[in-house]
Amino acid sequence: MDQRLFINLSPGNTYLDKLTGKTKVRLFFAFIILLIATWDMRIIFPTLLVSVFGLYSLKSKLKSVRAITVFVILTNLFNLFLIWVINPDYGATICGGSTVLFQITSFYVVTGETIWYFLVRFCKMMATFVAAMTFIQCITPSELAAGLYANKIPYKVCMIVSIAFRYIPDIMRDFTNIKISMQARGMELDSKRTTLWQRLKQNVLILVPLIITSFDRVGNIANAMDLRGFGKNKTRTYYSEHEDGKGDGQMKILYTALYLFIIVVIVLRIVKPGEFLVWYPFQN
Amino acid sequence: MKKPVIELKDFSFRYKSQKEFTLHDINLTIYSGEKVLILGPSGSGKSTLGSCINGLIPFSYDGEMSGSCKVSGIETREANIFTISNHVGTVLQDSDAQFVGLSVGEDIAFSLENDAVSRPEMLKKVDAVAKIVGMDAFLDALPYSLSGGQKQKVALAGIMHNDVETLLFDEPLAALDPAMGMAAIDLIDQVHKQHNKTVLIIEHRFEDVLYRHVDRIILMNDGRIQLDTTPDELLRSDILKRNGIREPLYISALKNAGIRFGENEHLDSIDELDFDQYRDAVTRAFQNVALSQPKPKGEKIIEVSHVSFGYGHERLALNDVSFDISRGEKISIIGKNGAGKSTAAKLICGIIRPQKGEVRINGKDYKALSIREIGRMVGYVMQNPNQMLVKDIIKDEVGLAMALNGFDEAVIKERTEKVLRMCGLYSMRNWPVGVLSYGQKKRITIASILVLQPDVIILDEPTAGQDYKRYTEIMHFIDQLNREYNITIVFITHDMHLAIEYTDRSIVFADGECIADDAVFKVLSNDEIISRANLKQTSLVTLAHRCGIDPEHYIHYFIDSERGE
């Protein structure tokens, strides 16, 4: 039963896959923080390229992200369109200036600044999305737990993460079983034959046994963990966290540089706040 | 003098949430290196006793305790669960829930991780214990791809690291098919002998545990130790039936033939019995009885012809399968886990549809029917009643299927009441579902299916995790529905006893194919089918061979005589 979404459960063989959880987590946060900290296309665009290259390097699993990628691109484009509908000259407040390229009505204009802002915004969103996808695709839940722990997150919190991923497929299987048995008892879940409200009410009915069986399971899991000494010591080691490889050394240089760069970017924004949010290359 | 490992003195325990004590005045000493079976029906306190020994009581379950419980010399109430788990390793009943890792290796390493063992050392240790249980080739496997037996091996490996003195198995056979169960008992025996552990097995399936030698048996019931004795002595007595435990079949058969066992006979293994002294008595009892004739068949309700089905690109889950089911029959669909028996049940209910071939219900191809429409002709009762119960009050639960199918209030009321009467639940109709026992819940799920008046009900492992007493209760009830209301019953099971005692015909699946479809006694006396389907040969076959009787006839005779009682 393949109901694991695009979560990766067994480690792959590519360069990124082989990194330790610690390195993966640090790299990911470096990318995300950098992307949040800046609106500068000179930073965002290379980040996007690197993220796309990262995702591409995991090629075997590309198929599973295709649908969600299309979905994200479309929602982002729609979002930009809505911004434009509400305020066509939005770029002026962000980039400072208003170079009209062509006019539809007196209100609806297309300016170079707005297009540039939209481009930056789109690249930023896509870079964040691709970085996140790459991260999700190359890390297993156990590596994530180990990686978070290596970054000073308490191990009980890390355990919640990996346990959740461990039991999601089981709970989804329970859900399917319960749903089928309810259908056989006469519950109509076909969207053509019932109203949305009916279906919502019936889905709540399915949740009752799902929650009860899940609670039973939680009790058993807790006992199994207690009996094998979970919570005994202040520290913990991880089976899935292998020793640093060649890639980890190289990536350490990369993320250290990135974190230093982030500090510089943030400091610069505080010390020398620009007049406008977005760097615009075509300023008159 | 042997060293005592577990010592309970005048020990009693009451759960915080309960009024009555669950354990009373337990006095028990288990010595180093012993292999002990703690035997008892559900609710006898045997699992609670296990929890006291491994420290879950009082660590995870609060309650009132008196007397003393020492494990490896440590008074449990003064220690914590981590200290105790260094001495006692526990394999829990639910092999899926206790698999907390995301791969075999990770799960085996779990206790090492918690001990903060360095990774190089961890890998070595994981490898060593994985070899002991034979899972070293699967270290990277995901939990979802493992069988129940494999998960249990992993659980066993996971507790072997710290050189624990005692291994505790809580109902190790509950989720396994017969052949896997034999393998598990074998493995436990091997670990006991080679690694010199003290082994405690908590079980109610006596005959299956006896597959390998046990030193001592503690029989529990009503929270007390009823008997603390050797297997031979227990088998000789008739105390088992009185305490809701099933006797091994060969012992019942011999006792039925009027045989009294002598003081010094070894009874715990059929291979060691001296049949020369029994042969005459067995043959005599057998010869005087006329065998029953098969019941005339009713009209065909379900016809499955040449159906194939596969999930995705995998091997076909059903490969050119044909069988039919007639009104009033009692059928068992048996086979190992993953052989296709659950897929066959899903096929009949229309949850999956044939990719090749066809299924006809009441003479009509069911292609055009929805799951809901098929549900009114074929009812499906899931294994775990908690997965089916959605309402607070019993009569609402039972009436739900009719309400969902849009019947009138008045009709619902009338039919619900009728079904509640049929199922002996009428007096409880206004009770909340939550307060019921497992067996009663099972009964309600059956009632909630019966209310639609289906032609066939399919029950998935109706007795899983049930002791003999509750098992008998549930099965008697289903049998009665068949007899009095001519309801067709299909069991999906790997329980051979169930097939023998309560069904007339068996359809056997192996590797997606239907390998046998015949009277139960014929199927179970066929060695080839038994081994292909991962079933276990019943001891009756061995007994028949040793007495020089045809096993097929003997099983037939045995079934007749059991039902005649």
Image (tube, rainbow, N blue to C red):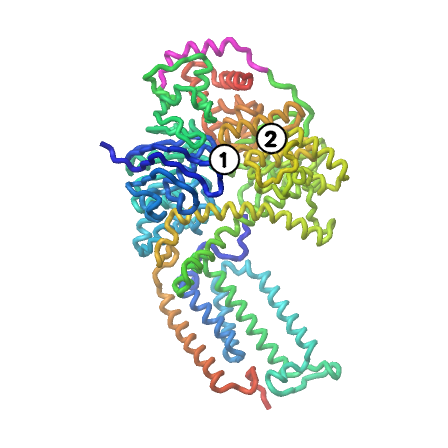
Residue B542 screen position, x and y as percent:
42, 20
Q: Is residue B130 left or right of residue B520?
A: left
Residue count near mark 2 (Cα–Cα under 10 Å), binned few <14, some 14–19, many ≥20: many
> Hey, which quadrant is residue B395 in on the image?
top right
Q: The C terminus of chain B appears in which quarter of the rendering?
A: top right
Residue count near mark 1 (Cα–Cα under 10 Å), binned few <14, some 14–19, many ≥20: some
Residue B179 screen position, x and y as percent:
44, 32
Q: Is residue B12 left or right of residue A197?
A: left
What amino acid type is highlighted by mark number 2? Val
Residue B167 screen position, x and y as percent:
35, 39
On residue B490, the disc is: 2
Cα separation, mark 2 vs mark 1, equals: 19 Å
| Residue at x 58% of width, y 64% of height | A69
**SS under mark 1:** loop
Q: Which is closer to the viewer, label 2 or label 1?
A: 1
Residue B318 visible here: no
Task: Name the residue carrying label 1.
Answer: B465
Task: Decide: is A30 above or below B295.
Answer: below
> Hey, which quadrant is residue B356 in on the image?
top right
Q: Is residue B557 magenta?
A: no
Residue at mark 1: chain: B
On residue B218, the disc is: none
Of A248 and B41, nearer the camera is B41
Q: Earlier in the sequence, mark 2 or mark 1?
A: 1
Of A204 and B173, nearer the camera is A204
Residue B171 screen position, x and y as percent:
43, 36
What amino acid type is highlighted by mark number 1? Gly
Q: The N terminus of chain B appears in which quarter of the rendering?
A: top left
* The magenta segment: B273-292
Helix, strand or loop for the magenta stretch, by majority: helix
